[in-house]
Amino acid sequence: MIDWNHTYAAIWRQRQEFLRPVRQIDPIRLDQLLGIEPQKQQMIDNTQRFLAGLPANNALLWGARGTGKSSLVKALLNEYLHEGLRIIEVDKQDLLYLPEIVDDIREHNQRFIIYCDDLSFENGDALYKPLKSVLEGSIELPPENVLFYATSNRRHLLPEHMRDNLETQLVDGEVHYSDTVEEKISLSDRFGLRLAFYPQHTQTYLDIIDSYFVDYPGNREALHKAALDFAHQNAAKNGRTAKQFFNAFSNDERTEQL
């Protein structure tokens, strides 16, 4: 039994069917997340409404990899854990346990975010059905102290194909989607807050680099060139790549010689 007064996050472990308390929480803070200010503010506003007991929306953060989606959810926990915010992380394959997890926390005083990272489904995958039910589709209303936040690379969480649109029709200027498209859209529609994260510009990437190397004493232009070379090698200019560059080059002879 978890003491939620002193535990701020937990992870569902399927094989033992229990919640494992998280002892070392990722310390990322909101002010460390650069280049996503509009998305960050909307998530802050939604979470503050939730903590205040006001109506708030389930949130889907979708888009390019490495752009801060999961870091934003973690940073929200660090910002509001002393105001009663708690997070339970659930893997996609464990979504069938959602009803049991929610039943276990619905009577607590804390406010819980059920968090699923990198959420997506394949054709024929039925795991999304318990999620739809918990979000809105059950005869029982979702508990007022629980929200669902998810990150994904897909806007509608399910794969989309051109053939799905072949039966879509335009009638009197109004789009009538095919049953297949309707089924896919109906899942993402249950997230009242859907935020897009796009690939970051070069300057944003360099700003993130500078935030990691605040006290760097060497040639800043040379540091930027090394960071861009590293990004080209990894085929991505984003926050994740910037952190990887820092991990590889901070306090390293190569950066001291730049």
Image (cartoon, rainbow, N blue to C red):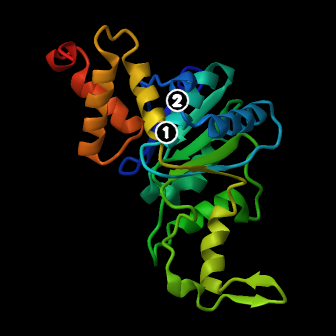
Task: Out of 247 and 209, give the one closest to the viewer.
Answer: 209
The answer to whether residue 3 shows anywhere in this view is: no
Left or right? Give the position of 242 relative to 131. Answer: left
Residue at 55 percent across and 37 percent down: it is 73
Is disc 2 placed on a helix, strand or loop? loop
Left or right? Give the position of 161 relative to 113. Answer: left
Residue at 20 percent across and 13 percent down: it is 256
The answer to whether residue 100 shows anywhere in this view is: yes
Task: Out of 126 and 203, give the one closest to the viewer.
Answer: 203
Hey, what amino acid is under mark 1? Gly
Would you call the spot at circle 1 few (<14 residues within 10 Å), some (14-19), or many (20 or more)?
A: many
Check disc 1 and report the residue beneath it.
68
Left or right? Give the position of 69 relative to 258. Answer: right
Specify the quadrant that holds the C terminus.
top left
Residue at 25 percent across and 29 percent down: it is 226
Q: Position of residue 177 (x, y in %)?
A: 69, 83
Is disc 1 placed on a helix, strand or loop? loop
Quadrant of the image occupied by residue 222 = top left
Q: Position of residue 241 (x, y in %)?
A: 34, 37
Q: Are marks 2 and 1 in contact (CB under 8 Å)?
A: yes
Check disc 2 and report the residue beneath it.
33
Hey, what amino acid is under mark 2? Leu
Q: Position of residue 147 (x, y in %)?
A: 67, 45
Would you call the spot at circle 2 few (<14 residues within 10 Å), some (14-19), or many (20 or more)?
A: some
Residue 188: mark: none
Q: Earlier in the sequence, mark 2 or mark 1?
A: 2
Task: Out of 232 and 19, give the one closest to the viewer.
Answer: 232
Residue at 46 percent across and 73 percent down: it is 125
Q: CA distance from mark 2 to mark 1?
A: 7 Å
Q: Position of residue 154 (x, y in %)?
A: 51, 61
Image height of 253 relative to 9, above or below: above
